[in-house]
Image (cartoon, rainbow, N blue to C red):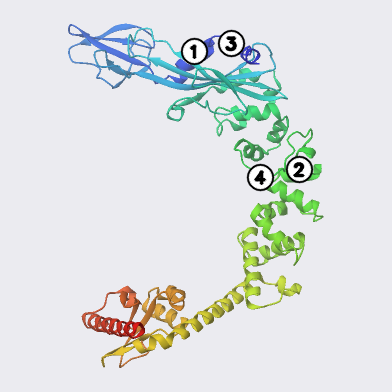
C-alpha cells in the first residue's frame, strides 16, 4: 500500500515549486551582506548572487535596514557579514499540488517544510524541502493521507487532516499554498469543475475541500447552484443533521426535495444552512407543506434541545400544532426568533401548572396573545411566591420581635414581609430584596431602622447572623452616620446579651 501510494509523487521538488518558494514564500528572505574592503563598502546579494562595491566613505547601508540591490532591484535586508548569524534560518510551510505520476486523473498534494539557511556560508544558499505529509485525491473515491511521524516513518491517517500532525511548531510558521499549482494539477480532471476557487479565501490549503470534492461529486453542483454555505458546514465539521444526501446523483436527491423547491431554496442560498433543509424535510414529512422561507424561520425548533421540549409536550398537542402556534405568535407578537417564542411558551405552561390552571382546553394551552398572558401569569406567580416566603417570615417573628429596640430617638425591628423588604430596597436604592429567601429560611436576620418621629420612612437596613453584625447600610449603601452607628452598636450588644442569656437558660 505504501509503495503504491508514493508512486503518485515525484522524487524531487519540481522547478515550478523551487521558483514559487524563491519568489513567493521566501520573498522576504533576500539579504545584502555587506563588509568593507579598505574604504569601500562591498555587498553580496543572495538573490542575484552578485558582488559589487557600494561606495567610498560613510556606510551606505546599515545592519538590519532594508535596501534595494543595485544589481537586480530586489528589496533586501542588510546584514553585516561579521555579525553573528547562528539563528539566521528562514522557514515556511508550503502546500504544493501536482498531477499524479501514474494517473493523469488523480491529483496529489504535498505539505513541505522548507528552509533557507544563512547561518554558515551565505553564498549560493538554496531552498531545502522536506515533505511532512502527502495526499492523494482520486475523483469518485476520496482522499488518502500519509504523514511523517516523530519516528521518521511514514504512517497512514484514517482521515485526511488539513495540517501535518506531528510537525513541530506548525502554528508558529507561515503557511503558503500555490493556487496556481492547484489550477495546473486539476486541469483535465473531474476536479477541474469542482468550484474550488469559491473556497480559496476561507480555506487556504483546500486539502479538506479536495478530500470532500473527490468523494462526493455533488459538491460541484451545490457550489454552482450557490449552496456554498452547505459545503462550508461540512468543511468546518459542523453538524449537517442528515439533511444532505452527499452521494445523491441529482440535486433533487441531494437536497431531498422536488425540483421546484430546489429553485425556491436557491433564492435563499446566502442564508440557507443544513438545519434549514432539515426543517423543510421534517415538516413536509409530518404533512405540513411549509415553504422554503417558512422552513428557514422554523429551523431553530429542530435543534435537539428545542425538539426535546416539543416532544415533552406531546400530551398537549402534536409537533405540527405546536410549531404552527409558535409561528403565528412569532409574527403576531414580534418575538426575535422562533426559539425564543418556544422558551416563552414553555415558561407560560410552567406558570399555569404552578398556579393550578388546567391545561385541558385549547384556549389555555394556546392563548391568543402569548406575551400578554405570559407577563400576566408571571406577575401572579411572583405574588404567590412572595406570599409563601412571607408566611415563613411571619413564622419567625415571635423569635425576632423581642429583639426590637429603641432609645427614644431611633427604633429598630425585624422585617415583617417580602413586600416590606422590596419596598425598603426600592426606597433606599439597595438590594436587600435579594436576601428575602435567605431571611425566610432562617439563614440570616434582617432588621429595619427608623426614626421614632417617622416610623414609616426607611432609614437604614441591618443584616445579622446570630449575634454578629454582617452589614448596616443607609440610602444607596451609604455607611451609617456617627449617631446611627452608636445606636446600632448598642442594639448589637443587647442582641448578644439576650441570646447569651437564652443559651444559658437552655443549657441549665
Q: Residue 61 location in percent, x, y? A: 25, 17
Could you tell me how far apart the alpha carbons at marks 4 and 3 are, in whole angstroms? 41 Å
Label pair 3/2, CB-CB below 8 angstroms? no
Q: Nearer the viewer, residue 162 or 314?
A: 314
Q: Is residue 165 visible?
A: yes
Q: For this rendering, which residue is in front, 325 or 228?
A: 325
Q: Which residue is mark 1?
A: 18
Please identify, in this view, whether the residue under mark 1 or under mark 2 is nearer the observer. Answer: 1
Question: Could you give the CA–CA distance between mark 4 and mark 1, rounded to whole angstroms?
Answer: 41 Å
Closer to us: mark 3 or mark 1? Answer: 3
Mark 3 vs mark 2: in front:
3
In the rendering, which numbered label is found on residue 273? 4
Residue at (48% x, 22% y) in the render: 93
Q: Residue 56: image x %, image y %?
A: 19, 10
User: To which residue does mark 3 refer?
Assistant: 10
Q: Residue at x 66, y 16 (%)?
A: 1
* Residue name at image x 33 percent, y 12 percent: 70
Secondary element under disc 4, as helix, strand or loop, is loop
Depth check, front residue: 142 or 291: 142
Which residue lies at the image location 72% right of the left edge and 51% below the top edge? 279
Among the two numbered marks 4 and 2 on one chain, the one whose residue lies closer to the N terminus: 2
Q: Quadrant of residue 461?
A: bottom left
Which one is earlier in the sequence, the residue at label 1 or at label 2? 1
Q: What secondary structure is marked by label 1?
A: helix
Q: Is there CB contact under 8 Å for labels 3 and 1?
A: no
Element on which disc 3 rests: loop
Mark 3 Cα-neighbour bin, 10 Å: few <14, some 14–19, many ≥20: few
Q: Is residue 439 left or right of residue 319?
A: left
| Mark 4 vs mark 2: in front | 4
Percent across and percent down for residue 500 are 30, 82
User: Residue at label 2?
Assistant: 263
Amino acid at each position: 500500500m505504501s509503495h503504491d501510494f508514493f508512486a503518485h509523487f515525484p522524487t524531487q521538488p519540481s522547478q515550478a515549486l523551487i521558483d514559487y518558494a524563491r519568489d513567493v514564500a521566501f520573498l522576504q528572505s533576500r539579504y545584502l551582506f555587506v563588509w568593507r574592503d579598505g574604504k569601500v563598502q562591498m555587498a553580496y546579494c543572495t538573490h542575484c548572487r552578485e558582488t559589487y562595491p557600494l561606495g567610498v566613505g560613510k556606510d551606505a547601508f546599515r545592519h538590519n535596514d532594508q535596501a534595494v540591490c543595485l544589481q537586480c532591484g530586489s528589496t533586501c535586508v542588510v546584514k553585516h557579514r561579521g555579525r553573528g548569524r547562528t539563528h539566521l534560518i528562514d522557514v515556511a510551510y508550503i502546500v504544493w499540488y501536482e498531477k499524479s505520476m501514474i494517473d493523469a486523473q488523480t491529483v496529489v498534494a504535498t505539505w513541505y517544510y522548507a528552509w533557507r539557511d544563512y547561518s554558515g556560508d551565505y553564498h549560493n544558499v538554496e531552498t531545502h524541502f522536506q515533505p511532512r505529509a502527502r495526499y492523494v485525491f482520486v475523483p469518485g473515491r476520496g482522499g488518502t493521507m500519509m504523514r511523517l511521524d516523530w519516528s521518521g516513518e511514514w504512517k497512514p491517517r484514517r482521515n485526511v487532516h488539513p495540517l501535518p500532525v506531528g510537525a513541530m511548531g506548525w502554528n508558529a510558521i507561515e503557511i503558503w499554498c500555490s493556487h496556481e499549482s492547484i489550477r495546473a494539477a486539476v486541469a483535465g480532471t473531474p476536479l477541474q469543475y469542482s468550484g474550488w476557487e469559491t473556497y480559496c479565501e476561507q480555506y487556504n490549503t483546500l486539502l479538506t475541500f479536495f478530500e470532500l470534492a473527490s468523494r462526493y461529486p455533488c459538491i460541484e453542483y451545490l457550489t454552482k447552484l450557490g449552496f456554498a454555505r452547505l459545503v462550508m458546514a461540512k468543511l468546518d465539521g459542523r453538524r449537517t443533521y442528515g439533511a444532505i444526501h452527499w452521494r445523491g446523483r441529482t440535486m433533487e436527491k441531494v437536497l431531498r426535495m422536488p425540483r421546484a423547491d430546489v429553485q425556491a431554496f436557491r433564492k435563499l442560498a446566502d442564508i440557507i444552512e443544513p438545519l434549514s433543509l432539515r426543517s423543510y424535510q421534517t415538516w413536509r414529512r409530518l404533512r405540513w407543506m411549509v415553504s422554503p422561507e417558512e422552513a428557514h424561520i422554523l429551523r431553530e425548533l429542530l435543534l435537539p434541545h428545542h425538539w426535546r421540549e416539543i416532544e415533552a409536550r406531546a400530551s398537549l398537542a402534536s409537533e405540527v400544532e405546536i410549531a404552527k402556534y409558535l409561528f403565528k405568535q412569532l409574527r403576531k407578537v414580534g418575538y426575535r426568533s422562533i426559539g425564543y417564542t418556544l422558551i416563552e411558551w414553555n415558561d407560560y405552561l410552567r406558570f399555569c401548572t404552578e398556579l393550578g390552571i388546567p391545561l385541558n382546553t385549547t384556549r389555555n394551552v394556546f392563548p391568543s396573545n402569548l406575551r400578554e398572558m405570559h407577563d400576566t401569569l408571571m406577575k401572579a406567580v411572583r405574588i404567590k411566591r412572595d406570599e409563601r416566603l412571607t408566611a415563613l417570615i411571619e413564622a419567625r417573628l415571635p423569635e425576632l420581635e423581642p429583639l426590637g429596640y429603641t432609645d427614644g430617638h431611633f427604633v429598630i425591628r425585624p422585617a415583617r414581609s417580602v413586600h416590606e423588604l422590596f419596598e425598603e430596597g426600592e426606597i433606599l436604592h439597595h438590594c436587600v430584596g435579594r436576601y428575602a429567601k435567605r431571611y425566610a429560611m432562617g439563614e440570616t436576620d434582617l432588621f429595619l431602622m427608623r426614626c421614632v418621629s417617622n416610623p414609616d420612612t426607611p432609614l437604614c437596613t441591618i443584616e445579622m447572623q446570630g449575634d454578629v453584625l454582617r452589614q448596616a447600610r443607609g440610602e444607596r449603601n451609604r455607611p451609617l452616620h456617627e449617631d446611627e452607628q452608636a445606636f446600632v452598636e448598642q442594639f448589637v450588644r443587647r442582641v448578644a446579651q439576650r441570646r447569651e442569656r437564652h443559651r444559658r437558660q437552655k443549657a441549665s
